[in-house]
């Protein structure tokens, strides 16, 4: 079992920055892929970024490329999403998940609101 807790959301003006954290506990994350998704009410969940815990390789959605950076802190079992140059359309609930073999775990999400 993996428990995930997101934090760092809030209200920010367009052009600003936020850093989200996804803290994991319960088991080692080696072999897991950690992802950030976001969702706006009434719309489908959208993939944002992924990081491989063991290799550190990353993948970003085109909509955030060059603005968002996913990273990990091994000792803290934490994945970060640094979000720069935020746009109003980045407003959403951001959730992290862990895909570990055949198991998928989700956090509860954190609200990010970008004002114009």
Image (cartoon, rainbow, N blue to C red):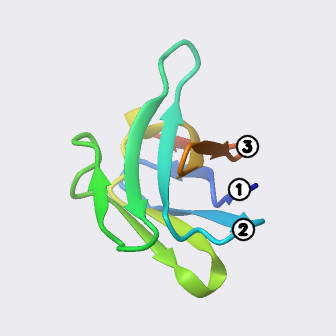
Quadrant of the snapshot with the N terminus: bottom right
Between disc 3 and disc 1, the foreground one is 1
* Element carrying mark 2: loop
Mark 2 residue crowding within 10 angstroms, few (<14) / some (14–19) / many (20+): few
Residue at 64% across, 60% down: 8
Closer to us: 52 or 70: 52
Q: Is residue 114 above or below residue 8?
A: above
Residue at 50% across, 37% down: 38
- Which comes before the other along the chain, label 3 or label 1? 1
- Which comes before the other along the chain, label 2 or label 1? 1
Residue pointed to by mark 1: 4
Residue pointed to by mark 3: 108
Residue pointed to by mark 2: 27
* Element carrying mark 3: loop
Between disc 2 and disc 3, the foreground one is 2
Closer to us: 30 or 50: 30
Q: Looking at the picture, how far across and down is residue 46, in whole percent?
A: 42, 31
Side of 25 relative to 83 (left or right):
right
């Amino acid at each position: 079992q993996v428990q995930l807790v997101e934090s760092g959301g809030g209200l920010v003006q367009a052009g600003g920055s936020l850093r989200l954290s996804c803290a994991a506990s319960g088991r080692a994350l080696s072999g897991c892929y950690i992802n950030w998704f976001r969702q706006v009410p009434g719309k489908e969940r959208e993939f944002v970024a992924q990081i491989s815990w063991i290799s550190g390789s990353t993948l970003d959605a085109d909509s955030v490329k060059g603005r968002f950076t996913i990273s990990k802190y091994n000792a803290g079992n934490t994945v970060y999403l640094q979000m720069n140059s935020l746009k109003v359309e980045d407003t959403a609930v951001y959730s992290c998940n862990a895909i570990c073999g055949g198991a998928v775990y989700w956090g509860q999400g954190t609200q990010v609101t970008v004002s114009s």
